[in-house]
Image (tube, rainbow, N blue to C red):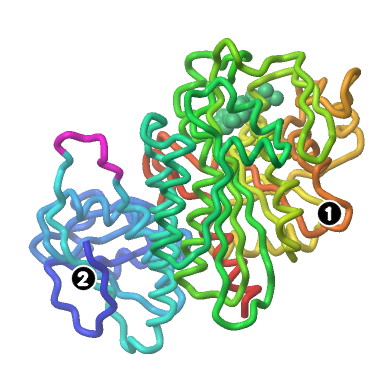
Amino acid sequence: MEIDLVTDIKSDIEVEFIDSKSLKKHKQYKTLNLAGFSAEQDSICFLHEKSILVCGIESDSNDDIRSACSVAIKALKAANYKSASFNVNKSNTQAIVEGIILGGYEYNTYKSKPTKSKLKNVYLACEDIEKLKTTFEEAIIIAEATCFTRDIVNTIPEDLNPPTFADLAKNLAKDNGLKCEILGEKELRKEKMESMLAVGRASRHDSKLIHLTYKPKKKAKKVISLIGKGLTYDSGGLSLKPAASMVTMKMDKAGGCAVLGMIKAVSELKLDIELHVFIGAVENMLGGDAYKPDDVLVTRSGTTVEVRNTDAEGRLVLCDVLDYAQDKVKADYMFDFATLTGACMVALGQYTTGIMGHSSKLKHSFHAAASSSGELVGSLPFNKHLKTLLKSGIADISNVSSKPYGGAITAGLFLDKFIREENKDKWLHFDIAGSAYTETPWDCNVYGGTGAGVRFMSNFLQNISK
Ligand code: BES
Ligand code: ZN
Ligand code: ZN
């Protein structure tokens, strides 16, 4: 399916948006009324004889337009039209592009007979192409990077394991002119990343640390490090997950997939920033040589960690990768993305990414970036009482809290222990446990990986590179 910005419409069908207040004024009100259409948000009505698809919206906000577009594109893909058109303006172009690309996304790799859509062309009709061109092209780049992230998240653990993850990163680097460095287990041992290595020890796949770099042509305005949790499968390890909770755990690599999508977007947008991506690609399995509760791990930083639960493995990988990233790059900002805790979903619901960190100003920038890019974020506050719950009787810190509440925050506080004093205000942790994956469609998200983080991070990076 191709999307083009045009001035004259020659399509099989035209998509219209309407709210309930304007419904009575519609030329085809009688027919729409007979069909029972009341312009409710996300309801649609085909007027086949008039070549119109009418979509209900609650308001003309970008959130409502994006959601309505997602419903429209699914209906169009299921129908037999070859082309469709949407009217766009400067303020809704991004939302319409996202609705079409993200709402129309399908992952058919494992279907033996995928249904083929007849829809070949989607036209976005406007008055002046020049005025909208940049907005349109940037929206396409970001939406496609989001789909790239979704594709990797959706890939099954047999196909996407730490070595194949590293290969995929190498290919992206080749395609997009990035520098790529991969550390295997030998190098990880040399780097003293014993905590990350312990998590991956029982897997038949070698753990990998992936480091990609994008450098702009002009002098970089800022240097940024993005760190991603890349658990290609999280069985829980010896603290085995219950059967029902293990299903979907291929998505535990979504943080790593998100930061890959982000560097893809940044390199195609050609932003004037230097961007580093670090991914800890590991599989958490069981076996005779699995790491276990009661182990004490010596992390790269020298801090010792008592393992009380092998299912709290993400933080054990990230603590070493965060430490490595801080040595490798002196960054202006450092952001990590991880499907870190089920508790984040309990706190915020499954649609919202949790933000943690010390700088209120930086957190606020992400509230703004999320709201203008159509993602949901919520801040979870650190406090010293929750920090106390990570005390260990035998090591410097325990990998789990001693109390069952505030689990997303205590996980964030565990990571905080590995952030150096000079970087405290430069760092934020994003818990995407709920927002990265869905089994029921919502907004422009369909079954599977959502690509959470790619849109708001691209928006933030676009703003700081101006
Ligand atoms: N990968 C999980 C977190 C998760 C849960 C992500 C559900 C997405 C959906 C993480 O490694 C984990 O298992 N965390 C534990 C931590 C606990 C043992 C302290 C959790 O959330 O239960
Ligand atoms: Zn786990
Ligand atoms: Zn995990």
Residue 301 placement: quadrant: top right
* The C terminus sits in image quarter: bottom right
Camera-nearest residue between 24 and 274: 274
109 falls in the magenta region: yes
Q: Where is 463 relative to 434, above or below? A: below
Residue 100 position, x and y percent, is: 32, 60
Residue 413 position, x and y percent, is: 80, 39
Q: Secondary structure at mark 2?
A: loop
Q: Is residue 99 left or right of residue 345?
A: left
Camera-nearest residue between 86 and 407: 407
* The N terminus sits in image quarter: bottom left
Numbered circles on residues, count: 2
Residue annotated with mark 2:
27
Q: Where is 81 relative to 218, above or below? A: above
Label of residue 424 in the image: 1
Q: Residues within 10 Å of mark 2 (few under 14, many from 20)?
A: few
Q: Secondary structure at mark 1?
A: helix
Three-letter code for the amino acid on which mark 2 is drawn: Lys
Q: Is residue 125 left or right of residue 195?
A: left
Residue found 41% across the figure and 37% down from its top: 160
Q: What residue span does the magenta drawing correspond to? A: 107-113
Residue found 48% across the figure and 14% down from its top: 243
In front: mark 1 or mark 2?
Answer: 1
214 falls in the magenta region: no
Q: Is residue 93 left or right of residue 201?
A: left
Q: Is the Cβ of the residue at disc 1 closer than 8 Å to that at disc 2?
A: no
First of labels 1, 2 by sequence position:
2
Is the stretch drawn in magenta largely helix, strand or loop? loop
> If the picture is divided into quarters, which one holds ligand 1?
top right
Residue 253 position, x and y percent, is: 52, 39
